[in-house]
């Protein structure tokens, strides 16, 4: 789930001041030496998979230094980001530039961590300066904000202010919304096939194979990763299996609210279900002038 605006605003302040935290003094953000994490590490090694958590928010006390230390102690690589948009922590080019510069100060063995943004406004690519876009390593988006709520603000689907009276008609609009998000120059589609709680019980009926194919085909054509998010029930197995068959690339994410490590069993479960190998895992390419990297062939 996503934070309320209030929480998000509070957290950006924490992101800017908390980078001085000393990891050694406060190591509860590290992954424990659990059997699950051990099996995950061994499975990844066996399959030639390097896992990166591309969905580490620097909020709620989580810092770039903690993300760097977590990478060094777990072997799971870190990509750090924060929410961008009106009424979100990174709401201007100035705050975005400061965020990128700050996150890039933290080094792991002399190299910087990938730095991204999670975009929440559908015109984000016209509002981010070319310089900031060039400095970002990736852009992550989900489909969890659509239309306008009763308060005249973008409707956050996890905080719906009225029930969905006609799920089929709603799903038609939601599909258009999914296509629009995938049209943007994004790198990762987070929490694909998300549905609001009130209609999540109708997932199998609403997410027809035709709809799933549309989303997957567009992601594949544009080189956009489909995220496997820790502790999220989306997407379900049918979508994931179809995506693998259609040649999709997958990314991993936690979507944290604080430094506490999440349960990674979902990652392991999907790796096993889909029999993922190194080649199935998405790798970022540099965004250039708002154009998606798949159009210029640069990988790395
Ligand atoms: Zn997020």
Image: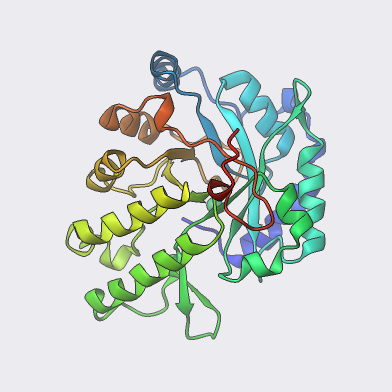
Q: Is residue 164 above or below residue 272?
A: below
Which residue shows up at 27% across the image and 56% down it?
A: 212
Which residue shows up at 46% across the image and 55% down it?
A: 1
Which percent across, then down, holds residue 2? 51, 58
In the picture, measured across the screen, residue 163 lies left or right of residue 251, that is left
Q: Which residue lies furthest to the front in this view?
A: 296
Query: Does the rendering let one see residue 191?
Result: no
221, 31: nearer the viewer: 221
Which percent across, then down, holds residue 11? 68, 54
Which residue shows up at 58% across the image and 47% down it?
A: 293
Q: In which quarter of the image is residue 290?
A: bottom right
In the picture, measured across the screen, residue 199 lies left or right of residue 96, that is left
Which residue shows up at 68% across the image and 25% down it?
A: 69
Which percent across, then down, holds residue 75? 57, 20
Which percent across, then down, holds residue 196? 35, 65
Q: In this view, does 227 lie above or below 96?
A: above
Q: Is residue 90 above or below residue 164?
A: above
Quadrant where the image shows the C terminus:
top right
The structure's colour scheme is rainbow
Query: Does the rendering let one see residue 215?
Result: yes
Q: Which residue lies furthest to the left in this view?
A: 205
248, 97: nearer the viewer: 248
In the picture, measured across the screen, residue 175 lies left or right of residue 262, that is left
Q: In this view, does 216 lie above or below 75?
A: below
The number of numbered discs placed on residues in the rendered structure image is 0
């Amino acid at each position: 789930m996503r934070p309320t605006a209030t929480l998000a605003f509070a957290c950006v302040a924490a992101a800017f001041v908390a980078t001085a935290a000393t990891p050694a003094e406060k190591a509860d953000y590290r992954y424990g030496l659990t059997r699950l994490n051990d099996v995950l590490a061994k499975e990844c090694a066996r399959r030639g998979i390097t896992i990166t958590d591309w969905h580490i928010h620097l909020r709620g006390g989580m810092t770039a230094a903690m993300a760097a230390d977590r990478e060094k102690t777990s072997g799971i690589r870190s990509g750090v980001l924060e929410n961008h948009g009106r009424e979100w922590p990174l709401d201007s080019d100035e705050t975005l530039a400061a965020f990128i510069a700050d996150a890039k100060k933290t080094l792991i063995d002399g190299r910087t961590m990938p730095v991204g943004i999670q975009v929440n406004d559908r015109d984000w690519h016209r509002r981010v300066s070319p310089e900031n876009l060039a400095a970002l390593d990736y852009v992550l988006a989900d489909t969890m904000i659509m239309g306008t709520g009763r308060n005249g603000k973008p409707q956050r689907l996890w905080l719906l202010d009225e029930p969905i009276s006609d799920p089929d008609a709603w799903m038609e609009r939601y599909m258009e919304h999914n296509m629009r998000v995938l049209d943007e120059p994004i790198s990762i589609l987070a929490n694909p096939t998300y549905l609001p709680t009130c209609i999540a019980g109708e997932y199998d009926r609403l997410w027809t194979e035709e709809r799933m194919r549309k989303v997957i085909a567009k992601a594949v054509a544009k080189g956009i990763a489909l995220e496997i998010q820790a502790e999220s029930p989306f997407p379900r197995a049918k979508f994931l299996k179809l995506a693998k068959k259609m040649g999709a690339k997958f990314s991993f994410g936690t979507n944290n609210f604080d430094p506490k490590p999440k349960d990674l069993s979902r990652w392991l479960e999907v790796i096993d279900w889909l029999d993922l190998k190194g080649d199935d895992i998405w790798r970022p390419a540099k965004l250039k002038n708002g154009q998606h990297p798949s159009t210029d062939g640069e990988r790395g």
